Amino acid sequence: MALWFPQIADGGVIREEYFWLPSLGMNFVLRIDGFAWLFSMLVLGIGALVSLYARYYMSP
């Protein structure tokens, strides 16, 4: 996610498409613009802090 920053900072949109059920015409598409990237980084950062806190909170 962090490696996509230069392209997103230039106003680009990341679009990845994977064929999920081609016989039914169903694909998995991931589309990330600047706003989605910002919130994904926010969630990633908060999750990392929670994991770090839990490591010391749960230690014997």
Image (cartoon, grey):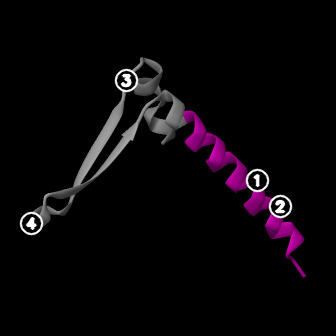
Task: Name the residue beneath numbered marker 1.
Answer: 49
Q: Amino acid at mark 4?
A: Ser
Q: Residue at position x 36%, y 40% from top?
A: 31
Q: Which residues are magenta?
A: 38-60
Task: Name the residue beneath numbered marker 4.
Answer: 23
Q: Nearer the viewer, residue 1 or 36?
A: 36
Q: Quadrant of the C terminus?
A: bottom right
Pointer 1 with pointer 2, Cβ within 8 A: yes
Badge 1 local density, few (<14 within 10 Å), some, or many (20+)?
Answer: few
Query: What mark, if any, has residue 34 been given in the picture?
Result: none
Q: Residue at position x 25%, y 48% from top?
A: 17
53 on left or right of 7: right
- Disc 3 from disc 4: Cα separation: 31 Å
Q: Amino acid at mark 2?
A: Tyr
- Of callouts 1 and 4, the N-terminal one: 4
Badge 3 local density, few (<14 within 10 Å), some, or many (20+)?
Answer: some
Query: What mark, if any, has residue 53 been given in the picture?
Result: 2
Q: Amino acid at mark 1?
A: Leu
- Of callouts 4 and 2, the N-terminal one: 4
Q: Residue furthest bottom?
A: 60
Q: Main secondary structure of the magenta part?
A: helix
- Disc 1 from disc 2: Cα separation: 6 Å
Q: Nearer the viewer, residue 35 or 7?
A: 35
Helix, strand or loop for disc 2: helix
57 on left or right of 33: right
Helix, strand or loop for disc 3: loop
Q: Quadrant of residue 7?
A: top left
- As for residue 44 lying within the magenta part, the answer is yes
Query: What mark, if any, has residue 12 been given in the picture?
Result: 3
